[in-house]
């Protein structure tokens, strides 16, 4: 009969052995199992089924909107990514004379030039495949909200499409 210590050691060795011999997916193999979402309706369906969506924003494929004049300028040479696991859907009847949309946001603490800010990004997905992205900083020292970006983009449909917002699900 094994004593308690020997039993725990044996379990540990069995666990390590299973980890050593377990197949490991490379990043290339992992990306092969991702499925790209190419429409608003597909995005709704995937989210309503409870799956998490990964977002990759290629801002240089988007238009940055001047918040004062409304003029569009080329987007920044930047790429961002996040998981869409929390969202809200607002149907036709929620806001009068406004289209339905899916919304998500993410907030995280970041360090810029030695100063901490709360970084906030909000995305709205519309049935016409457009995506609105708003980014703001919250200065945690003086409680000031700093408008950063107001971006207009399109959902990427795969292949040679130049839409800047790419969505994926699956493992």
Image (cartoon, rainbow, N blue to C red):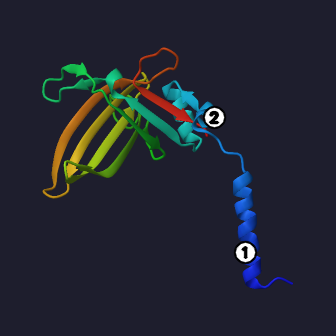
Residue 169 picture location, percent across and down: 56, 36
Q: Is residue 45 visible?
A: yes
The residue carrying mark 2 is 29
Which is more foreground, mark 1 or mark 2? 1
Q: On residue 83, which mark appears? A: none
Helix, strand or loop status at disc 2: helix
Looking at the image, residue 169 sits to the left or right of residue 69; the answer is right
**Residue 71 horizontal/vertical position (percent):** 18, 20
Which residue appears at 46% of the width and 28% of the height?
Answer: 166
Percent of width and height locating residue 149: 24, 34
Left or right side of 142 for 152:
right
Measure the alpha-carbon separation of dots 1 and 2: 34 Å
Q: Is residue 39 left or right of residue 119?
A: right
| In the depicted structure, whether residue 32 falls above or below residue 89 | above
Q: Secondary structure at mark 1?
A: helix
Query: As drawn, which residue projects farthest toward the top?
Result: 160
Q: Is residue 6 above or below residue 149?
A: below
The quadrant in which the C terminus is found is top right
Is 167 in front, or is 1?
1
Mark linked to residue 9: 1
Counting residues from the start of the chain, the first of labels 1 and 2 encountered is 1
Q: Which of the two residues, 110 or 107, is positioned nearer the viewer here? A: 110
Q: Which of the 4 image quadrants contains residue 67?
A: top left
Residue at 49% from the left image edge and 38% from the top image edge: 54
Residue at (52%, 16%) from the top-left corner? 159
* Mark 1 burial class by Cα count in 10 Å: few <14, some 14-19, many 20+: few
- Between residue 7 and residue 85, name the one nearer to us: 7
164 with respect to 19 (left or right): left
């Amino acid at each position: 009969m094994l004593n308690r210590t020997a039993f725990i050691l044996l379990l540990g060795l069995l666990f390590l052995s299973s980890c050593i011999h377990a197949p490991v997916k490379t990043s290339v193999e992992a990306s092969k199992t991702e499925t790209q979402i190419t429409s608003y309706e597909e995005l709704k369906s995937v989210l309503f089924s409870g799956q998490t969506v990964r977002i990759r924003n290629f801002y240089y494929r988007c238009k940055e909107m001047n918040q004062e004049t409304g003029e569009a300028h080329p987007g920044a040479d930047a790429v961002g990514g996040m998981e869409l696991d929390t969202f809200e859907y607002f149907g036709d009847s929620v806001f009068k004379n406004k289209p339905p949309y899916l919304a998500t946001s993410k907030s995280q603490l970041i360090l810029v030039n030695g100063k901490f800010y709360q970084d906030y990004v909000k995305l709205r997905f519309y049935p016409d495949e457009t995506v609105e992205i708003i980014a703001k900083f919250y200065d945690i020292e003086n409680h000031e909200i700093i408008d950063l970006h107001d971006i207009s983009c399109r959902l990427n449909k795969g292949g040679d499409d130049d839409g800047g917002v790419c969505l994926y699900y699956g493992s």
